[in-house]
Image (cartoon, rainbow, N blue to C red):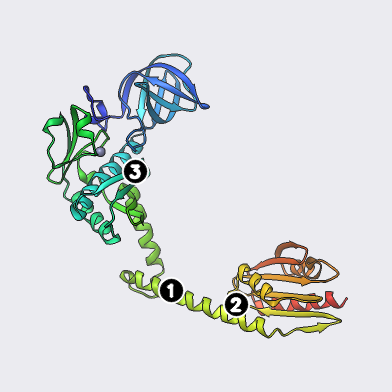
Amino acid sequence: MFLKMTEPVYWTDPKKSTFEVTIAGVESVDGRVHIAVLEDVVRPASGGQAGDRGEVSIGSEKFTFSGCVRDRGSLFLVAEKGPSEAGRATLTLDIEWRTAMMRNHTGEHLFAKALTDLLGDVTLGRIWIDGNHGSVEVLSSNVTLDALFNAERTVNEIIARCLPVNSRVVKASEIDKEVRAREGVTSKHDRLRIVEVEGFDKSACSGIHVTNTEEILVFKIIDYGIESDRAHVEFITGSRAVQQLSDIYNEVLRRKTTYPFQVEQIGAVLDKSKEIREGFEAMRDKLLETLTRNPAYDTIGGVRFRAEILPGFDTHLMKRFVKESKMKGPTVLLLFSPGDKCQVMLRTNEMPEEARYYIEDGMRAHGGVGGGRGEVFTCGFTGVEDPQVLFENLKTHIVNKISA
Ligand SMILES: [Zn+2]
């Protein structure tokens, strides 16, 4: 892929988006069509980079293509439908997709170089770049989250310095140590294309790039994973990154007045929140233990009945409550979790009727929604003004049903 005697137009003029082309034919492949194009004007998927997208029109007919592949030396546009005849056509690239790929891919060059400068020799594993995002795998045992963040900072500094990005084809023998190249590339090819970010990085690459780092706008890591011998990083660039950064910042700002805190302290706020949640969960466990250790049942004509309000309990915890209650003999258990949405579970044991018999009418009468079969019935109530009143009403309804 690195050897090219004639340079395709997307190497020299990646922003050109309209071309007159020759459709050589159309083939059916796996329920789609491959439209063969003679001119080397669109970039096929290769080297971990998605292909171009766009539209091709012949006369009044238009066909959208969602990808592009090179097969047996020929270039094919991947589409749902294609023209019935060969001939001249106008091809228009999806320039937004192309631009986003150029940004993401050049961002990946900068990031790989910044990490190399930080960590010494860095080997890149799998790479994927498309118009939505990019991901890289870094094979190294000394990547830390701080190193990733430092590299991200360097990339954004390089973007702000507006460095030109140039490419040229050179003899493999002219390549020096400064050039980043994948293992074996220089021995496989006589001539290589070098992509240079002036004053920062040179690497052997056949992909498409912006012509100045400022076009990337911003580089933002959006996910990562660190293992013993590798790290995985997902990132976005361009207007998508700007939008996402401001969305997240605004999400934080929106809460600044309801939960007063300094925006810079969001990390500490989250840590505090985690601590409170853990404390709450521990307390809930304690409550569960206490309530199930000394069960207090009422007896209604030979049936044991118990109703409990359990703040903060979800269905999962209610199930645990039931399990640990170890119901024996004819028993009815009503569990009620109050809130904006009240959650209710009714469990029966050795009762003449299914659980739904004891609660369903009462639930409907109070505007609840739910269902169940056998000895389990669960339901929810929204917009409840006074959960305590609802609880008492349901309790009375069930007691009446048991007594009937
Ligand atoms: Zn490249």
Residue 273 numbered tag: 1
SS under mark 2: loop
Disc 2 marks a residue whose amino acid type is Pro
Mark with earlier residue (1, 3)? 3
Mark with earlier residue (2, 3)? 3
Mark with earlier residue (2, 1)? 1
Q: Quadrant of residue 392?
A: bottom right
Disc 1 marks a residue whose amino acid type is Ser
Left or right side of 88 for 123: left
- Give coordinates of residue 136: x percent, y percent: 32, 47
Residue 311 numbered tag: 2
Residue 126 numbered tag: 3
- Give coordinates of residue 187: x percent, y percent: 20, 31
SS under mark 1: helix
Left or right side of 266 for 113: left
Q: Residue at x 74, y 62 (%)?
A: 372
Disc 3 marks a residue whose amino acid type is Arg
Instruction: Measure the C-alpha gap from mark 2 to mark 3.
Output: 48 Å
